[in-house]
Image: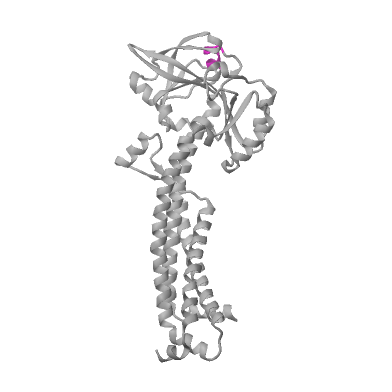
């Protein structure tokens, strides 16, 4: 009976209900949209880094992370490594052989990071083809290099030009060679864009004198939320005296800190939004109480218990909040879906600032359903807390005075 009475009451004054629902609608709408854009941008940052550098999970030889030299590489034919690709949560696993070298072209020299990789696999992983500014991706058996955009600008290189490289290979062997430039690529990672030179894995092993070896395996997961599970499974499957399994969060703590710092600012904005909304909802409740003092007095006079009366008011608040929150989620979903498929591209100084930090100047929206669920619950909690104010008024209400007013 109380539920039916509460439901009928919210439609007795449609204008009052519409105002309350509208305030909750816009609160949920803007909160979900703001958080979706913020978390979508973080997801884009993380995806750029893990696909272009570390992977969601990285497997390397024990001690390599602290001393990144070719002597700390490992044999690719080790049967234990099959556990990586056999894990059901692993989407791709890319072998890489990395080493530092002194590059030269004309009278200029520059230290670069040389990365040996499988071109077909890395194209799927990094989506390289659309990022190539000129030239074409080399083949697995080619003897050529793909040069990052900033390196090419430094040397004023064009496709077909030759670069000379000198380095120290595996176990101190002398590494020296010259390679033509097959393509120039723009990496979204600032570090790679300023110093990366890529060449086929087979040629990298030959250049560094490290046949059949790699320095790391970058693991990409089908579901990034299962990263901790995969780390634990691989750690249990591999010999930890030979190999180290590391998540991107461990490998890139500075990125985690940057996201946490920026996320704190976003949470402050949401807190301000909810403060404004909470005062608006509280004002609506005050208006509701003042309009219904006479009604409450009559109900108390004919014998309705104060607890039952407050329960009806409480249920009314829950119903209106639930309607507003659900409509807010339904209303914001098309907008979030649009920006998920068509990320907003920043321009001008904002885009330059983001590019300087090594990220793409785009803002995609996240479709994580927990965002909508979280903010619906927050609004519901605020509504429940505000609903205790009518209980205070009803407890103090004098039926005779209420009917006189």
The answer to whether one can see residue 342 in this image is: no
Question: In the image, residue 276 lies at what x, y percent?
Answer: 38, 63
Which of the 4 quarters of the picture holds residue 26?
A: bottom left
Q: Report the side of 113 relative to 244 (left or right).
A: left
Task: In the displayed orientation, state which residue is furthest to the top.
Answer: 174
How did the renderer colour the structure?
one colour
Q: Work out which quarter of the rendered image holds the N terminus and state it.
A: bottom right
Q: Report the side of 277 relative to 199 (left or right).
A: left
Q: Nearer the viewer, residue 299 or 119?
A: 299
Q: What is the total number of numbered labels drawn onto the structure image? A: 0
Q: Please, what is the dominant secondary structure of the magenta stretch?
A: helix
Q: In the image, is residue 49 above or below residue 3?
A: above
Q: Nearer the viewer, residue 370 or 284?
A: 284
Q: Nearer the viewer, residue 390 or 55?
A: 390
Which residue corresponds to the image point at 41% horizontal and 92% vertical from the top-left? 404
Question: In the image, residue 319 lies at what x, y percent?
Answer: 52, 72
Question: In the image, residue 358 lies at what x, y percent?
Answer: 40, 34
The answer to whether one can see residue 273 in this image is: yes
Which residue corresponds to the image point at 43% horizontal and 89% vertical from the top-left? 401
Q: In the image, is residue 376 above or below residue 171?
A: below
Q: In the image, is residue 143 above or below residue 399?
A: above
Looking at the rendering, the stretch of residues picked out in magenta corresponds to 202-209
Q: Nearer the viewer, residue 196 or 273?
A: 273
Question: In the image, residue 102 lies at what x, y percent?
Answer: 42, 14
Task: In the displayed orientation, state which residue is furthest to the front.
Answer: 396
Magenta stretch: includes residue 302: no
Q: Work out which quarter of the rendered image holds the C terminus and state it.
A: bottom left
């Amino acid at each position: 009976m109380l539920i039916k009475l509460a439901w009928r009451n919210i439609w007795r004054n449609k204008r009052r209900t519409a105002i309350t629902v509208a305030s909750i609608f816009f609160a949920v709408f803007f909160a979900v949209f703001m958080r979706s854009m913020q978390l979508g941008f973080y997801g884009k940052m993380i995806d750029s880094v893990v696909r272009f550098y570390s992977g969601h999970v990285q497997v390397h030889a024990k001690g390599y992370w602290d001393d990144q030299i070719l002597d700390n590489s490992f044999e690719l034919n080790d049967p234990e490594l099959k556990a990586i690709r056999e894990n059901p949560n692993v989407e791709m696993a890319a072998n890489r052989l990395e080493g530092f070298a002194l590059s030269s072209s004309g009278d200029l020299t520059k230290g670069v990071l040389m990365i040996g990789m499988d071109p077909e696999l890395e194209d799927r992983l990094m989506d390289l083809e659309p990022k190539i500014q000129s030239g074409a991706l080399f083949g697995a058996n080619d003897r050529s290099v793909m040069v990052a955009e900033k390196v090419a600008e430094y040397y004023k290189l064009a496709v077909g030009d030759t670069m000379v490289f000198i380095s120290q290979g595996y176990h101190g062997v002398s590494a020296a060679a010259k390679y033509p430039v097959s393509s120039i690529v723009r990496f979204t990672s600032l570090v790679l864009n300023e110093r990366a030179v890529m060449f086929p894995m087979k040629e990298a092993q030959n250049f560094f004198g490290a046949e059949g070896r790699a320095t790391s395996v970058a693991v990409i997961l089908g579901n990034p939320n299962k990263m901790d599970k995969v780390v634990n499974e691989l750690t249990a499957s591999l010999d930890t005296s030979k190999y180290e399994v590391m998540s991107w969060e461990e490998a890139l703590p500075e990125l985690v800190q940057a996201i946490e710092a920026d996320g704190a600012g976003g949470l402050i904005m949401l807190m301000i939004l909810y403060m404004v909304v909470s005062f608006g909802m509280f004002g609506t409740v005050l208006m509701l109480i003042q309009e219904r003092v006479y009604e409450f007095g009559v109900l108390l006079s004919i014998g309705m218990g104060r607890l039952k009366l407050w329960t009806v008011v409480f249920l009314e608040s829950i119903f209106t909040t639930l309607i507003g929150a659900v409509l807010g989620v339904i209303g914001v979903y098309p907008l979030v879906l649009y920006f998920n498929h068509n990320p907003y591209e920043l321009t001008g100084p904002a885009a330059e600032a983001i590019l300087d930090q090594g990220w793409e100047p785009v803002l995609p929206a996240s479709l994580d359903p927990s965002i909508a669920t979280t903010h619906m619950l927050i609004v519901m909690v605020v509504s429940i807390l505000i609903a205790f104010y009518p209980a205070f008024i009803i407890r103090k209400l004098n039926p005779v005075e209420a009917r006189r007013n």
